[in-house]
Amino acid sequence: MTAITINLNPIVELTDDQFYHLCRANPDLKLERNAKGEIIVVSPTGGETGKRNAGLIADFVIWNRQTQLGEVFDSSTCFRLPNGANRSPDVSWIKQERWDALTPEQKEKFSPIAPDFILELMSPTDKLKETQDKMKEYIDNQVRLGWLINRKTRRVEIYRQEQAVEVLEEPTELSGEDVLPGFVLDLQIVW
């Protein structure tokens, strides 16, 4: 099943608070919102993708507990990006000082902040072009480093601000560079 896009704008333009309450009132749905205000119903992942996502989160959490440099978030976390979109990356990380600058209310709802790092793991239902567009949107909205991992092709696309996308064929590991200092992801858990 692919994502479904619903355009309510001809009828009503939802405020950030209204979108938040819509999501809370429909907890069985995973909703995102693009910069045009369209609501996207995101398909759940299957077992294989979910298992790999859990392994990825574990690696990030372990690294972050050791370094205490920031906060790690799972795919259920929705962020309000500067362009107005509400997105939920599979894995995300925010530097501690940036997270601490938010108010308690901002932290509790859909936080108005772009993560420093995001990761998207393609599932069989994802469309490559749509996911690449989402990756570009992240980078255009202050995300510093993004990884798009495609299990099917064993390809990784690395997104950085003001740089061309770097494509790696069957890499064995990925470096967190200066965004995630000292972090190295062993891709054995993905392939």
Image (cartoon, grey):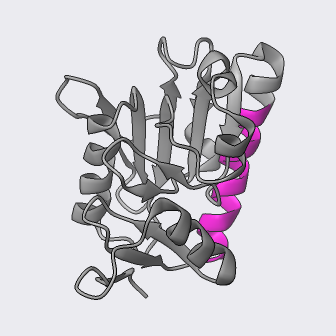
Task: Using the rendered image of the protein, determine whether residue 133 is visible from the camera's viewpoint.
Answer: yes
- Residue 91 coordinates in the image, percent (x, y): 59, 46
Task: Using the rendered image of the protein, determine whether residue 45 is visible from the camera's viewpoint.
Answer: no
Residue shown at 59% from the left, 22% from the top: 98
Give the residues drawn in magenta, as a range.
45-61
- Residue 140 coordinates in the image, percent (x, y): 26, 37
Residue shown at 30% from the left, 47% from the top: 83
Tell me where residue 130 sits by quadrant.
bottom left
Residue shown at 61% from the left, 43% from the top: 188
Q: Is residue 111 above or below residue 49?
A: above
State yes or no: residue 187 in magenta.
no
Residue shown at 40% from the left, 75% from the top: 40
Q: Is residue 185 left or right of residue 172?
A: right
Q: The N terminus appears in which quarter of the rendering? A: bottom left
Q: Nearer the viewer, residue 33 or 144?
A: 33
Tell me where residue 162 sits by quadrant.
top left
